[in-house]
Image (tube, rainbow, N blue to C red):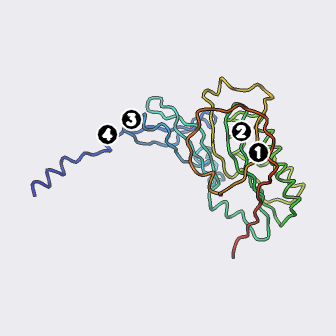
Amino acid sequence: MSSKSSKAKHIRDKWRSKSWYNVVAPSFFGNIDLGAVPAETADQLIGRVVEATLYDITGDFSHHYLKMFFQISVMDGKTAKTLFKGHEYSRDYLRSLVRRRTTKVDGLFNITTRDGFKLRIAVSALTLSRIKTSQEKIIRNIMIRIIKEKAAALTMDQFVQEMVLGKIGSDIYNESKQVAPLRHVGIRKSKLIGAPLNASEIALADGGIAAVEEVEPEDDDEIAEEVEIETETADIEDEPVADEEVSVTEEAAEE
């Protein structure tokens, strides 16, 4: 009996050796406090991904459906500074948008912002009724053009703000509604796939060229996978849009 009690006394409490660090959102989100995370040393937090909702940042309850991902990149004392890693619609919200006898037009694009950051974004347009293939093609071309213009004109910070707050989706909606009646248009997922070594050194001048590449989605959950952020940035060139069309799916909610 005494031997068991002595062993219990010598068990080390791992939590006592850990400290708590405050995690803050990037500066373009106002350095909002995202919470606290424990770690034995500050270096252990580098690269860790923290999840929040846009509601936690804006305080607007209508933004509760949008999940945000931030990766800790710099430690400043007890403060962990982050960079934007990606976002996605919640699964329940995405399902609520689907209706019977409607068309869902999807587009998956790789873009390069004006300051050299690479993002992969998934755009979805949901109609009020079924539409023709020709209309789907026109809507997708509108997506490509507007996203290319935005990527060429905006920095990473500006592009992310317009993306998650719905400005880019609203611009696509306003043009596409002339082609077919739409219920919703938005960027439902995004992922940071490349970052420059020093964004300030490779920042492009106004009017720079942005690369927009249309890619074929292999799996709907592919964007949600976490990847290590690249530390090298390829040359930013004006890449032609792929001729191959992104597959369009028509989803119907089962009764």
- Earlier in the chain: of badge 2 and badge 3, it is 3
Give residue 163's quadrant in the image. top right
First along the sequence among labels 1 and 3? 3
Give, as a three-letter code, the residue at label 3: Thr
Q: Which label sits on residue 200?
A: none
Residue 153 location, x and y as percent?
78, 33
Residue 134 falls in which quadrant of the image? bottom right
| Residue type for callout 4 | Ser
Per the image, label 1 sits on a secondary structure element best described as helix
The residue beneath circle 2 is 159
Q: Report, in whole angstroms, how far the alpha carbon at label 4 lies from the one at label 1.
A: 46 Å
Cα gap from disc 2 to disc 3, whole angstroms: 34 Å
* Number of numbered discs: 4
Q: Residue at label 3?
A: 41
What's the residue type where badge 2 is placed? Phe
Along the polypeptide, which appears first: circle 2 or circle 1? 2
* Vertical relation: 46 (above or below) 144: above
Mark whose residue sits in front, 1 or 3: 3
Residue 17, labelled with which disc?
4
Type of the residue with mark 1: Ile
Residue at the spot 73% in from the left edge and 70% down from the top edge: 252
> Where's residue 39, x and y in %?
39, 40
